[in-house]
Image: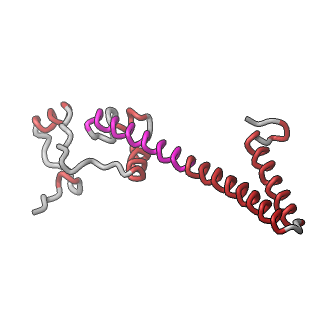
Amino acid sequence: MTTGGGRTAEEREHDERIHALLDLADAVAACRDPEELVCRLAELLGVAAKLVTERLAEVAGDEEDTASLEAVERRHIRRVLEQANWTIGGPRGAAARLGIKRTTLQSRMEKLGIARSAGMSTPRRNADDASVAARGAGPAPAGTAAALPKGP
């Protein structure tokens, strides 16, 4: 929530804590009594430790939010890929279902570490592919994957 001056309440609270820390440092520097110095130093260290702990918690929270967002995205993409029988492109592929380009989906899959498991069966051909094969459409064009010789 932003209030006057464009600063959030959290930012103002943080600034107040920093000023309190600086005031304590000034009080420590002005101490002449050793016992008071020890008490002021302990108070100073306590405030500093609290500030550091809070900041570390904020940073860790940011990382958790990022990780959980990626986890949600990963689960969603996997679910859509399974619904599309792991077909990425085409009008009924996962990219179309997600409303993104095929190349964008491939990039996201790579970034999120999504890959089809080795034990999964290959997607079934759709009816159009089966009817073309049944009609004997002839050999595959040169240079296509289907025209390349099979490996050992």
Q: Image height check: is 39 above or below 97?
A: below
Image point 17% across, 43% down: which residue? Answer: 121
Quadrant of the frame with the N terminus: top right
- Is 117 on the left or on the right of 89, as rendered? left
Image point 34% across, 33% down: which residue? Answer: 91
Quadrant of the frame with the C terminus: bottom left
Q: Main secondary structure of the magenta part?
A: helix
Percent from the top left, x then y, of residue 79? Answer: 33, 36
Q: Nearer the viewer, residue 44 or 91?
A: 44
Q: Image height check: is 29 above or below 94?
A: below
- Is 31 on the left or on the right of 74, as rendered? right
* Highlighted magenta segment, given as a residue range: 62-85
Q: Is residue 75 magenta?
A: yes
Image point 14% across, 48% down: which residue? Answer: 139
Q: Is residue 66 magenta?
A: yes
Q: Nearer the viewer, residue 89 or 65?
A: 65
Where, by quadrant of the figure, is residue 70 drawn? top left
Q: Nearer the viewer, residue 72 or 48?
A: 48
